[in-house]
Amino acid sequence: MRRTVYNEDHEAFRDTLRSFIEAEVVPVYDEWLAAGQAPREFYYKLGELGIFGIEVPEEFGGAGEESFKYQAIISEECARAGVSFGGSGVHVALCLPYLKAYATEDQKKRWLPDFVTGTTMYAIAMTEPGTGSDLAGMKTTAKLSADGTHYVLNGAKTFITGGVHADRVIVCARTAAPTPEDRRFGISLFVVDTKSEGYAVGRKLDKLGLRTSDTAELSFTDVKVPVEDLLGEENKGFAYLGQNLPQERLGIAVGAYAQAAAAIRFAKEYVQDRTVFGKTVASFQNTKFELAACQAEVDAAEAVCDRALEAHDAGELSAAEAASAKLFCTEVASRVIDRCLQLHGGYGYMNEYPIARLYADNRVNRIYGGTSEVMKMIIAKNMGL
């Protein structure tokens, strides 16, 4: 079936992006994998290409687009090539929505122009050691100084993607204690300069997958954050975080679908070239049936993603619908990628083959942005259960 979710402008962007990936990423991707991160200089190239400014208003140097579909195309093309843009996805997909929605005009003037060029890279720090998905349980604090000029930030964060290269980090911290009625009360957001005294990057975490994204531990020891760098209103941070979750989960759903589609592509190419017992692996009925079953699942995931993308652009994607899309697409991807790896035989277990990297990269999709179990809770609650 012909996809109708993208128009001519989207497809022109896809062509440009595909050429860029083939020229600038594929030839050096093995070096990035060995280093465990994309080089900082690569982000300047993304800035020059306009990747970071697609959804930034024109007055701040961006293209002023409101559609999330361009980010979906980036996910699809990276997956197709078996690569990623390192930790820079967080810069746009997770951080930009908060800056656009809650930054003051003065803050936007200060932050967004360098955001667009990649001169200032952003990450977001929510998760803490020992709290996981329970954001209301965070212990990091930000106390207003006696003279009211700055906050004093203390605490630690973990699993922070983009944390090594980040120049500014949106840090979630407690500015007030939770109330008996609402344990989510008292959380605020701060856009913290990583050059601040007392700010420290700890270990760059050694992950199973997503090897080119710099994921780190962060710590804050009496870090002074100017009051001008408070994002939005004090004590309303938890509500802000919740408002961006549907888009975050949609992005994960699209990425998972794209990985599953890429897995079929890699497996199809492999089985057509590989010979066993004098015949190509593709000629065996089992191979045909396995890939056909995978294709049917990916077709369904594509339909779910496309419907969700349209709903999101129309401002109609609910939290439960986003959770459903994430749950379905990530579960489909896990099955499809596993079956496609199996068709590679022993070579599928070798990291030199993109299917092996996909297998490792895909696993986190059912964890971050809310686990599959959390998605089921959201969906069940929406069902009145």
Image (cartoon, grey):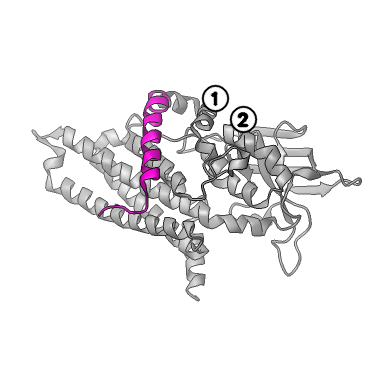
- Tell me if label 2 and label 1 are in contact, CB under 8 Å: no
Q: Amino acid at mark 2?
A: Thr
Question: Residue 56: percent from the left, percent from the top?
Answer: 57, 43
22 with respect to 366 (left or right): left
Q: Earlier in the sequence, mark 2 or mark 1?
A: 1
21 with respect to 265 (left or right): right
Q: Residue at x 46, y 45 (%)?
A: 71
In terms of depth relative to the viewer, which is nearer, 47 or 283?
Answer: 47
In terms of depth relative to the viewer, which is nearer, 252 or 111?
Answer: 111
Q: Which residue is mark 2?
A: 119
Q: Quadrant of the N terminus?
A: bottom left
Question: Residue 6: percent from the left, percent from the top?
Answer: 37, 49
Q: Secondary structure at mark 1?
A: helix
Q: Please provide the residue range marked out in magenta.
A: 1-28
Q: Could you classify mark 2 by the number of other residues whose Cα lies within 10 Å: few (under 14), some (14-19), or many (20 or more)?
A: some
Q: Residue at x 39, y 59 (%)?
A: 307
